[in-house]
Amino acid sequence: MLAAADPWIRWDWISRHGDDIAAAVREHVYLTAVAMAAGLVISFGIALVARRWRWLQTPLLGFSGLLYTIPSLALFAFLLPITGLSRSTALIGLTSYTLLILTRNIIAGLDGVPADVLEAATGMGYGSTRRLVGIELPLALPTIIAGVRIATVTTIGLVTVAALIGQGALGALIKEGIERPFRTPLVVGSVLSIALAIVADVALALLLRVLTPWTRRR
């Protein structure tokens, strides 16, 4: 039980655990970044397959949707006999939750490129790969990055759940704050998780502005 007079923030605890807090932030960023990078690579491959063979789009998105609906604790529990209490368990679970969002947005972004633009590129001698890299992907970036923003914020939140398998980064602080008789670790972990999500979302929005200057002129 928490004492009635227990303060929300104990600055002496923060000063003593500064290195631990910094390490938790680094681990949180690492888990998020790796899961997002892996999710992007896998989702891009799935999206290209789905566009090449349209009949595969529904089952591929359906499977990604199935993974997305599995509760995180259940998924981690399913992976434990295979990968144990390891970072791999956390990363596999976190990556699986990015696939639906990223795949849908990549497909939507590529499908949203106007047909006349594709025809003009083909008429100018662009092959399929050059057209994809030089024409389709730049025009699809707003939709793709919108998905990346959603997936990133979601992943930052899910990393905290991984504390239950010993890989939670800032989630470990939240867990400690729940289990111990004072609230400071809970507050620090929660506030920093929210701050990371806000910073990541703003950074991705700014990145989109840099990569798509034509949208600013419009």
Image: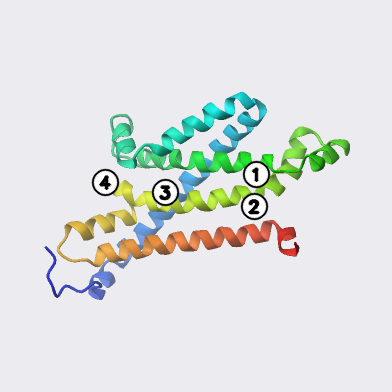
Image coordinates of residue 33 in percent, x first then y, are 48, 50
* Residue 96 coordinates in the image, percent (x, y): 44, 38
Residue 97 place in picture, x, y as percent: 44, 41
Are dots 2 and 4 in contact, CB under 8 Å? no
Q: Which residue is mark 3?
A: 31
- The mark closer to the camera, 3 or 4, is 4
Q: Residue at x 54, y 43 (%)?
A: 102
Q: Provide the residue designation for mark 2.
A: 142
Q: Are marks 1 and 2 in contact (CB under 8 Å)?
A: yes
| Mark with earlier residue (2, 4) | 2
Given this view, does label 1 or label 4 mark the residue nearer the observer?
Answer: 1
Residue type pointed to by label 2? Pro
Measure the alpha-carbon separation of dots 2 and 4.
35 Å
Asked if residue 63 is positioned above or below residue 120 in the image, the reply reads: above
Q: Residues within 10 Å of mark 1 (few under 14, many from 20)?
A: many
Residue under circle 1?
Answer: 109
**Residue placed under numbered mark 4 in the picture:** 164
Where the N terminus falls, by quadrant? bottom left
Q: Secondary structure at mark 3?
A: helix
Q: Quadrant of residue 83?
A: top left
Instruction: State yes or no: discs 1 and 4 in contact (Cβ < 8 Å).
Output: no
Q: Residue at x 39, y 54 (%)?
A: 28
Q: Residue 15, labelled with which disc?
A: none
Q: Earlier in the sequence, mark 2 or mark 3?
A: 3
Residue 127 screen position, x and y as percent:
80, 33
Cα–Cα span, label 3 and label 1: 26 Å
- Tell me the residue at 47%/30% (across/down): 63
Mark 1 vs mark 2, CA separation in Å:
8 Å
